[in-house]
Image: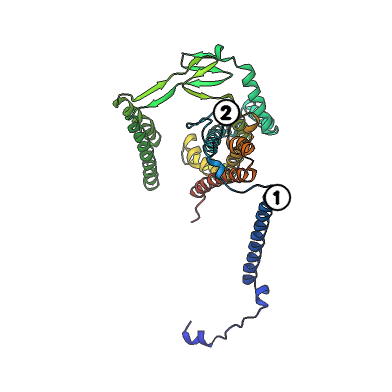
Amino acid sequence: MTDATALSRPTESFSLSKLWYDKKYRSVILQMIAMAILFAAIFYLAGNAVSNLEKLGKTFGFDFLSQPAGYDINQRLIEYDSRSSHLRAGVVGLLNTILVAVCGIILATILGFALGVMRLSPNWLVNKLSYCYIEFVRNVPVLVHILLIHGVLVTTLPKAKQALNVGDQFFLSNRGLYVPKPIMEPLFYLVIATFVGGIAYAWYYRRQARIKQEKTGAQSPVFWVSVGAIIGAPIAAFLITGMPLAWEIPELKGFNFRGGLALKPEFISLWLALSLYTAAFIGEIVRSGIQAVSHGQTEAASALGLPRGRTLNLVVIPQALRVIIPPLNSNYMNITKNSSLAIAIGYMDVVATIGGISLNQTGREMECMIIVLGIYLCLSLIISSIMNWYNNRIKLVER
């Protein structure tokens, strides 16, 4: 198009009616109106809350977080006592929430994939057993599972003095599972560095092996090289540095054990209940994901001479993951949010600490609820971001 042609085109006049009848302008205006209504509602609710607090003679602030908490937490990952602040109590509760969420996600994923494969098994008994398990577990509320498992553990396990003893190292009673606690010496950080380096090398080797296979078709021993880098190299570093790791053995003193690492019945109950419950949903997701892959893909791989294991790893699973990952994201967030039911059995998560005892002691219900809501929102967004990143990595690339 020449400049003369452009100059000869008549300029389109602007009128106010275009703000509504033009699709582009109307879309922008509607979005501006929606945002204005949203902010107006937020300001109205905030002003209403402040007004109600003033009528009750309360102020709004987070200065209470620096005051002594005055209560104990039996399950903790960092140092804490009753003289610590409410802020530290909240951090202990947050770490407990993250601990049970991470452990639950790992166990639920393993069990869920196993259940999904069992649901597709040609063996009638295995198929029906997994079907009955899934239908029973997912149709009972998760809170009932938590209370049931906690009740079974507390009432059936022996008292501390009659604890089940495994080699004078591991003790199981109704007070929990006590195991030796590792005490790291300075040289152990070299072993940790070797482990991290092994993971990085395994990732690099796997990437190079994939490129080599795409170019030449030759397969590399990715599995055994990864095992050697991630497991073999740290073990060698551990032995070379003189095994720089000591163990603190738990001992029975009085009515309970002292020392070592303790997994309380509340944590074990919550962990098992959340994992078993969510695994039932993941099992169905995995089954539907595998069935979504056309059987012709498997037949084509077999026609090319690929063994069954390689067909599963290279053809079926990569395509099934594209169906499995999005709903898996929701189940991971559900595990994290359902961990708030821990308060029913006395597990001190973030709801029981900041949202429970700290709230009752300070009377700062508005501030405590804002903190709890913000924490769960952040955790869910982090999980969603990680899963969306992974989903984008494995999605089908159009050519």
Answer whether residue 284 is visible to the viewer in this image: no
In the rendered image, residue 221, in percent from the top left (x then y), is placed at 37, 36
Image height of 295 relative to 142, above or below:
below
Residue 86 lies left or right of residue 138; in this view the side is: left
- Circles 2, 1 touching at the beta carbon (< 8 Å): no
Tell me, yes or no, if residue 142 can be seen here.
Answer: yes
Q: Amino acid at mark 1?
A: Lys
Horizontal relation, residue 284 to residue 232: left or right: right
Q: Can you tell which quarter of the image residue 121 is in?
A: top right
Q: CA distance from mark 2 to mark 1?
A: 41 Å
Q: Is residue 107 left or right of residue 142?
A: left
> Who's the residue at 63% across and 64% down the image?
31
The residue pinned by badge 2 equals: 267
> Where's residue 10, x and y in %?
57, 86
Label 2 CA crowd tier, 10 Å (few <14, some 14–19, many 20+): many
**Identity, as a three-letter code, of the amino acid under mark 2:** Phe
Q: Residue furthest front?
A: 57
- Label 1 crowd bin: few (<14), some (14–19), many (20+), radius 10 Å: few
Q: Quarter-wise, where is residue 75 in the image?
A: top right
Where residue 134 sits in the image (x, y, percent)?
Answer: 66, 32
**Residue sitting at x 65%, y 80%:** 15
- Residue bearing the label numbered 1: 55
Seen at 50% across and 55% down, the residue is 398
N-terminal label among 2 and 1: 1
Q: Is residue 369 above or below residue 182?
A: below
- Residue 339 pos. (x, y %): 60, 35
| Residue at the spot 47% in from the left edge and 18% down from the top edge | 250
Q: Disc 2 vs disc 1: which is toward the camera?
A: 1
Work out whether 33 lies above or below 348. below
